[in-house]
Amino acid sequence: MPNPLRRTATAALIASALAACDGNDTRHIRADVAASSGGVFSDDAANPSVTVRIPAGALSKDAVLDVEEVKNAPAAGPNQVAAGTAWRIGLSARSGGAAPTLTQPVQLELPASPAPAHPQLGEVARLSGSSWQRLPASFFRPSTKVVVALTSEVSGTYRVTLRSLQRASGAGVDRGFQVFMDETFGNELFFGDVVGLHTVLNGVAPATAVGLGAQVDLAKVPADVAALMTGSDLAAKDAALQDAAVTRKLIKAGAVVGVKGFYATSDAGDDQMIRAGITCALCHQLVQPTTFQLSSGPAALPIGPLDVNGVPNPKMDAGKILSFTPFAVSAGQTTVALLAGWGPSNFDVRALPDNALDDGVNNPTSTPPMWNFIDLEEAGYPFGWDGLFVGQDALASQAEAVYDVVMHANGAFGTASGTIPPALRTAPPQAVLDALAQAEVATPGNVVDRQKVLDLQEWMRSIASPAPGPFDESKAEQGFGIFHGKGACNTCHTTPELSGTKDGPFLANITVAPATGALAGGIKVPGLRGVSQTAPYFHDGSASTLAQAVERVTAVVSSVTGASFTADEQAALVEYLKAL
């Protein structure tokens, strides 16, 4: 008899297993399931092609489980590849009448053939009409090449599909990267004439600059500096790292990522900046560090090739840099202390002078990663920590707002002269609209180019989250169950991207202190793919490790549900997050 459904030894009930095959040799398997004890069912204990795990007490009544191979199932949809047998799975009442209901999810385990290869994700999908809808809870077990999924609608047709994280391509992506790296839209007028950033950069030593998070593109380092740093004269290297002239030389060569110097003359020897502008790359771009031999021993310095992967710069201490500027010093010690207190990877986008979004409170937020934006958009994900930007061209609209209001280019966001219609979840308060209009009256004109922000959007859409690093598979699978079960993490991270949506929930309670000002309405729920590479965590960067983040989240869950979490369960959640 072909492929009888085999009850595993771990199950606690006695079930009858029947097998039959039709004229097409279709596998059709049936077993009784007692509601009180559930069970674990597979077609072959040694090499299963389908396994159904029904928790004890999950069924409202005793049931009959039917599992049937589906031949000629519909093809996978766009951006999906079928990877294994399709199975029709159903539960019916053993004694007749209405079908049993579930009080907790059933776990399905289906082999992936072929196995997913990054940037593919192995997921279990359920047939809906003629298309396959991925389940929001899937976990790929690399050691056995099996996809584990949870579903509360067990009756249906299921199969493994491979979904690739979507990435834009084409000429717009290449142009957008250049915008990201080089475009200031004239903000050097603000950072030069108002803030005086150049006066700090003209006198800062390279060692100090890299200590504050500066990244240096090795491809643009002048040859003589590169030769010195790779040479054997340790004393000369030590001296160079303390020489502000070397910093100026690097900036003039365009080697300091995210910084553009402007000079009084075109003379090659004129390295004293009269203004300095910044680009998006300052906070959002890293390089691959290089280890140099110094008199103190080997040291890994942020001097190397660009690492274009969407990981933010966790060491960029923009507030500390700004605290040294003439603007901050003249404003007084309170302002200096406020800016210096933001810390690495944090920036208050409403804080700088002449900012129409100024909410009057100190709200530094951490620099988020830039990846999976196409998939996140399709899931209804809101951009910005306040979740304000959604819908078509949301990334371009957010970029326009950042260039204009935060980076102080001469733009016109939110006015009739704006570059693109604002893609906002809700209309801004009238006071904000009035401030934006007044800013346009005070400084008329708009240099934020439409095609450039659209190209920048395309580049941002071209990046996929990185492949997971090492993780403990067994503990990660345990964490997967906790995340989608006792931990209730999926009540906020609701989508297959493990993100929130534009319709909520927005949470402001997983914070060290209650969010205030423009963030008092709630902090958006971020996507979690690649989360292990994006420390620090939360909107304020207040958790430096995944373990700290999990500890805080489980404390919040405990306060709401009364559930308690052991150290082992918290560690399992950390391993699951590392697997994403």
Image: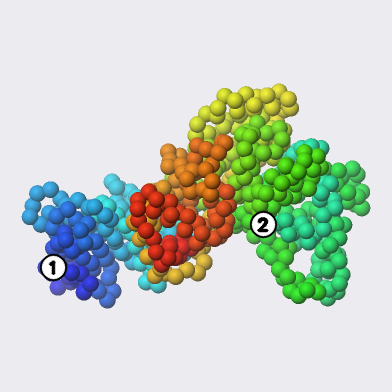
Q: Which residue is mark 2?
A: 315
Left or right: where 69 falls relative to 238: left
Q: Crowding near pointer 1: few (<14 within 10 Å), some, many (20+)?
A: some
Q: Is residue 429 above or below residue 536?
A: above
Q: Which residue lies at the image location 26% right of the left edge and 66% below the top edge?
A: 51
User: For the residue labelled by badge 1, is the local secondary structure a helix, a strand or a loop?
Assistant: loop
Q: Is residue 386 above or below residue 232?
A: above
Q: Is residue 558 visible?
A: yes
Amino acid carrying label 1: it is Ala
Q: Position of residue 162 (x, y in %)?
A: 40, 59
The label number, if any, that marks residue 15 in the structure image: 1
Q: Position of residue 448 (x, y in %)?
A: 68, 35
Q: Which residue lies at the image location 62% right of the left edge and 24% below the top edge?
A: 434
- Number of marks in the rendered image: 2
Left or right: where 525 falls relative to 275: left
Q: Which quadrant of the figure has residue 40?
A: bottom left
For this rendering, which residue is in front, 178 or 410?
A: 410
